[in-house]
Amino acid sequence: MIEGGSPPPPPPTRARRGAGTQSKEDGDVTFKQIAILPLRPIESARLDETEGDDFTFADTGDRVPKFKVGPVICILVDPPTGAFDLAVITRGQRLSTFEWRYRVEDILRLGLPFGEFEALEQLDPSRGQLLNPSQSDALLHEIPRQAENFDDWYAFVRERHAFALDLSSHGRDIVRQQADATRMALQIVGFDGSEVRRALSEDRQAPFMRDLDEGARALEDAVIISDWSAFQDWDETPPLHAAVKRYRSAQGRQVTIVYANRTNIETSTGVDLVYYRHRPPGYLLVQYKMYEGSGDSARASVNRQFRKELRAMNRVDSASRKHANATCEVLEGYRLSAAACFVKFCYRKPGFEGLDTRLLSGDVVPTEHLKIATKAGVKSFTPDSVASSRLTASQFTSLATSGLFGTCGDVTEALDAFLEASLKDGRRAVLALESGE
């Protein structure tokens, strides 16, 4: 880390400031483009806790600016305050098909206001992006006016990363040509490198995962745990309870999810997961059911256990409708709909709906729809029968963060007390709700 008053020792030859093209005469190597990286709250906290030391993080690439490998100079922005620092970011190991490991190093703590720089005034600090070369050049000439130690830092990082920067241009072609020549020479003398490459590769699946794409079935408990273990692209905060996970967005919004499956909470409410939205405060509750079969034959039967769970969920929904808006005397208590309970129907061979949610695909249906259907004698539900009322996983997560749906007022407070008692010591707590029926 580089503090405001203690820049690193400059290299022997002072590199020229600017983001122009590379000079062949003096060997000057430059960062041609600058990246903007909005920090998540957990990364901002890590930056503060480590006093700016190097750190790594994983990302799908949706938030990180699109650059091939790096290194690039990166503007580390704290979206809530708009203040930014500078660092060098490099893309490292591929963790999965879509996810990479990134390293942030050589951090220069500045705390400069993003919106006060002319080169940045048309850019969104909450979106990861690459500045074009002219914007980068303009910014590199603006920053020294407000940061006296910038010139020394910039010279230092250019000297330190000169080899990697050179490889990012014409040097990489030379290395490729040398590698091809070496490979051809080995092949001429009869050396087959395929076995060595296979032995060194870590991209292979674990043996028990090889054929899971073909006919793999998921148990209901595993599906519930999967959805409990992720929420959109939000960061998970340090755990407070084994059955509770809390997630925080880049903008500081929070959602807490309680794992209720096979507990007193499920017995009393009929649900497997309880979503609590912090602002405005309110709950959404979800029961999971599995479709048996696939395609047109997929269906979830309405058995005795399902009816029992629906009765418990209808009790919560009924109280929520009765108290909606009536007991909420502040603006954040307003609800467009008091619907609080849902059933998510999932397939036995589920797939993830998308990287934006990281939730398994399924049909999320309000219990009010199911209540009407079961009263009419419906014995099972199919994807077609719930199509008119279904939500996708991504639509449901948007619902969970919206203040227009879910419980409010007395019902929220009753669930607060019930969950606290249930989680505190595992005793059989009582959910005190005044029914609306």
Image (cartoon, grey):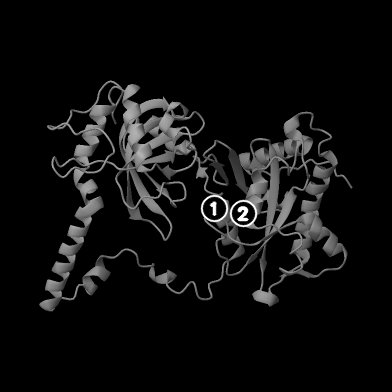
Q: Residue at image x 12%, y 32%? A: 12
- Whole-percent x, y for residue 8 in the image: 21, 28
The three-letter amino acid code for the residue at tag 2 is Ser
- Check disc 1 and report its element: helix, strand or loop: loop
How many residues crowd mark 1 within 10 Å: few (<14), some (14–19), many (20+)? Answer: some
Specify the farthest residue to the right. 437
Q: Position of residue 314 (x, y in %)?
A: 80, 52
13 to 70, vertically: above or below:
above
Residue that mark 1 sits on = 356
Residue receiving disc 2: 394
Where on the picture, by quarter, is residue 176? bottom left
Please, what is the three-letter code of the amino acid marked with disc 1?
Asp
Point 54% across, 51% down: residue: 230
Q: Residue at the spot x=65%, y=42% of the render? A: 276
Query: In this view of the protein, which residue sits in the foreground, 229 or 151?
Result: 151
Name the foreground residue: 73 vs 81.
73
Label 2: element kind: helix
Which of 256 and 130 lies nearest the eye of the viewer? Answer: 130
Residue 184, image x and y in percent?
15, 73
- Residue drawn at x 51%, y 43% is 236
The answer to whether residue 260 is visible is no
Residue 186, image quadrant = bottom left
Asked if residue 249 shows in the view, the reply is yes
Instruction: Name the mark on residue 369.
Output: none
Asked if residue 221 is positioned above or below residue 384 in the image, the reply reads above
Q: Residue pushed farthest left?
A: 189
